[in-house]
Amino acid sequence: MAIAPQLKMDLRNAQQMVMSPQLSQAIAMLQMNNLELADYVDEQLGQNPFLERDKKAGETNRDASVESLSAQPNDVRDAMNKAPEKVEKIDPVATDGVYQEGDHGFSSDSMAGVGSGGRSDFSNDTRAFDENITTTKTLRDHLLEQVAQSFADPRDQGVAGWLVDYLDERGYLPYDDDELMNKIGVKRGRLITVMEEIRGFDPAGIFARDLKDCLTLQLEDRGEMDEAWALLLCNLDMVAEHELSKLAKICGLDTNQLSDRLKALRTLNPKPANAFDHIVVQTALPDVMMKRMPKSEGGGWRVELNHDTLPKVLINEIYVNEIKQAGKADKETKTFVSEHINNANWLIRAMDQRAQTVLAIASEVIEAQQGFFLYGVEFLKTMTLKDIAEEVEVHESTVSRIVNGKFIATPRGLFELKFFFSSGVSNSDGQDVASEAVKSKIKTLIDAEDSKKILSDDTLTAMLKKDGINIARRTVAKYREAMNYPSSVIRRRQKNS
């Protein structure tokens, strides 16, 4: 006998988070840098007639001051000047999309000289470029390290830094002296002095003005440049046209000698920048800026958002009043006006909260990494997203969105915020040492090694342990390779060849 199916109603309570479109967009805004945010705001300005740019933004701004270790090492949030007692965070876990309105303009007038390459107007800039180690070494990083080693005068360092940023994708400097003098605002004598130095930088051929100049620099670096080479380089078009007999006569060489020269020519690199896989020619603009405050003002650090790139908008009250005074409107018009005014209000509040969150997290990072900013990369602490999230009272994912792709201009250079988050190894006291600090020690040891006594990974491991850093040999090898240092066998060949 068949049993009839029975219908039952079962009630259950369940919690489910529903993310509204506005909340989703607020989270996306956290991940944008200032330039990306500016593009997004431009879109909103085109879609919303009640929004307009705040042309007076920056006249009344707010900044945050962080006490330095030499002053009073208080919590960053206690040291924020004129900051609100409570700041609501845009947190994808805790928030329901309701934001508290506040001021989102931050002063950076005193920091306006911070350039794309981390150059600044800091009069007491004592940075060392081996303290600017990044996870992927770029041509720019490589050159700036040499700038710091080659120039003691900060003005020469500044000029050289500008010239690094003017390199094209080949590694050439496609401007004449007069153009560079106008672009940088430097006198001819200083420009020539700096140029003479940097044209000898590694890789050979960098800062050349054209192909002939590039090849000349490489031959000079090898110590092979002579009159025959000069004549050959002046007639490179004859090589392409296979007029080799004529070229040999011009250069004063026989055919075998010319053949040898052409073989050597093929070993030169016409595009020296190609030796680096990650070339950063375009400039990076800081989202956050910090500077050391003078003792007369209490010392410590001043932390600011870069208002030069941070977009600011407000509601066009004149247009709103015109709509209100127009009298009765149909239902469709009222709905349009209401939605767009609400969207405008939401955007302003969301931008404010983004600014507050960026500033709070950046300030906490600076507070946690005081040793790095005061003494250099070997004092960089190991730090996780969770560490900062707990201090700022937001979710780890919020910190992750903030620190990725956003740069901070500091007295030690320009860094992506995520640079300061790294795993570490233990020292003899059981404390963590940041991986970047360990890399810096390995770099120092390798750079100083004797060509007759090349340091193996085992030797480096032993030397680090003597300094109280407990690290495995395979980790030393991993860090060495990450900094593009070859093995001890290859280094021995290179230094003794």
Image (cartoon, rainbow, N blue to C red):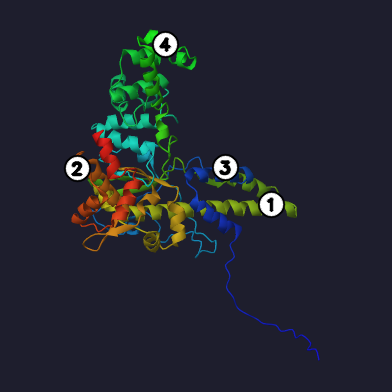
Of helix, strand and loop, which one carries label 1?
helix
Does residue 176 lie above or below 280 as drawn? above
Between circles 3 and 1, the one closer to the viewer is 3
**Disc 1 residue type (three-letter):** Phe
Q: Residue furthest front?
A: 256
**Disc 3 residue type (three-letter):** Asp
**Disc 4 residue type (three-letter):** Leu
C-alpha span from label 3 to label 4: 59 Å
Residue identified by numbered label 2: 453
Q: Residue at x 26, y 48 (%)?
A: 442
Q: Nearer the viewer, residue 96 or 12?
A: 12
Assess whether mark 2 and mark 3 are in contact (beta carbons under 8 angstroms): no
Assess whether mark 4 and mark 2 are in contact (beta carbons under 8 angstroms): no
Of helix, strand and loop, which one carries label 4?
helix
Q: Of marks 2 and 4, which one's residue comes earlier in the chain?
A: 4
Classed neighbour count for the residue bearing mark 1: other residues with Cα under 10 Å, few (<14), some (14–19), many (≥20)? few
Q: Of marks 3 and 1, which one's residue comes earlier in the chain?
A: 3
**Disc 2 residue type (three-letter):** Lys
Q: Mark number for residue 247?
A: 4
C-alpha span from label 3 to label 2: 60 Å
Between circles 1 and 2, the one closer to the viewer is 2
